Image: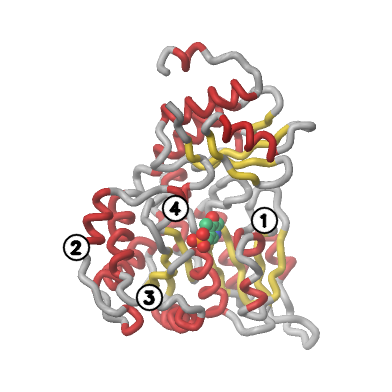
Amino acid sequence: MTRVVELRSDTFTLPTDEMRQAMTAAQLGDDVWDEDPTVHSLQRRAAEIVGKDASLFVPSGTMGNLCALLAHTQPGDEVLVEAESHIFVSEVAGAAVVGGLQLRPLSTTDGRIKPDQVRTAVREPDIHEPRGALLCLENTHNRQGGICISASATRELAGVAHAAGMKVHLDGARIFNSAVAQKVDVKELTGPVDSVMFCLSKGLSAPVGSMLAGSAAFVEQARRRRKMLGGGMRQAGVLAAAGLVALDRMVERLAEDHANARRLGEGLQGIAGIEVDLSRIESNMVFGDCQPPLTAREFIEGCKREGVLLDQASPKRWRMVTHRGVSAAEVDYAIEAVRRLMGVKPREDLRATA
Ligand SMILES: *Cc1c(COP(=O)(O)O)cnc(C)c1O
């Protein structure tokens, strides 16, 4: 049997049967005219869950982040971002192209911006300087390993930014992974910020879509930006119906993905030729480095021949992501595949259950 273990991303999750049924049954209207009842339900529910006045259904997390940046700023403003953040690295410079914004990267070793870094980066009113308008946080932080930002750190950072007259936007693509991993109500993580974006289409398993939440006035501004970017969708309730199921049914089970990530990390740790830092596995991601001369590309190709798919993060770095489509047995299969590839003999404890 050839099997494929899909560890490239949690975006590969497929909708559940319950989602497909909800999509078929959804009541629909034209959402550009603000008349789709299912979109309304999703927007109300999402806002309530993250403790904001209102929210907006957007086609992607990238568009949600861009709408937020546009709604919070004017062209020429400066936005503080973590140097490995999705907004800085992976959104095709949309903030610069569309928003005329200057993104100022703050370097960290683990994705956790320190309050002093924000204090140091505050702009004084000065004719030479851009206006420091916005601080962006990312939780969980993707490229730094899926690490979780705590509620207390979020409060402290937001406090520093607000005292300096800046707004705070949270890229919470995987905010529910963070809340479940830290065993806190998601409101603890979203309460201190002015706006939050989160994805329905990742671990929560909906086919398409993200939510952008904030004050009613902010969401009204964001709605105009969404239309400008071409993100106004007509009978979007067909997608929103799956999003409602995602919010009601798929959050608590993220704990399984986290347990599987840990199992995967523990199984891979100590295999000669690759390095996995267990201390950085906090949610559903496992990052590792290849020891030279092995490159990440060669490692990924080798894993692919064994039926295990993973993602490249840099010339030597790779990423594995656990999600609803990966069982504990498939995690064990992936561990054995890597051991075979790296020339390590099979683990007895796993062979017994294979
Ligand atoms: C996936 C992701 C996004 C963007 O989501 P898309 O729906 O793929 O556009 C934004 N931020 C982070 C941290 C992400 O992981």
- Upstream in sequence: badge 4 or badge 2: 2
Which residue appears at 50% of the width and 83% of the height? 228
Q: Is residue 337 visible?
A: yes
Q: CA distance from mark 1 to mark 2?
A: 41 Å
Asked whether mark 4 and ligand 1 are closer than 8 Å, the reply comes as: yes
In the picture of the structure, the residue carrying the numbered disc 2 is 25
Front of the two marks 1 and 3: 3
Mark 1–mark 2 contact, CB under 8 Å? no
Element class at badge 4: loop
Q: Amino acid at mark 1?
A: Glu
In the picture of the structure, the residue carrying the numbered disc 3 is 233
In the picture of the structure, the residue carrying the numbered disc 4 is 202
Q: CA distance from mark 1 to mark 4?
A: 19 Å
Which residue appears at 43% of the width and 12% of the height? 352
Give the total of numbered labels.
4
Q: Amino acid at mark 2?
A: Ala
Q: CA distance from mark 4 to mark 2?
A: 23 Å
Which residue appears at 59% of the width and 26% of the height? 338
Residue 309 in the image: state x and y as whole percent.
54, 39
Which residue appears at 68% of the width and 29% of the height? 274
Residue 272 in the image: state x and y as whole percent.
69, 22
Asked whether, in this view, residue 40 is left or right of residue 73, the answer is left
Front of the two marks 1 and 4: 4
Residue 88 in the image: state x and y as whole percent.
65, 63
Query: Residue pushed farthest bottom?
Result: 127
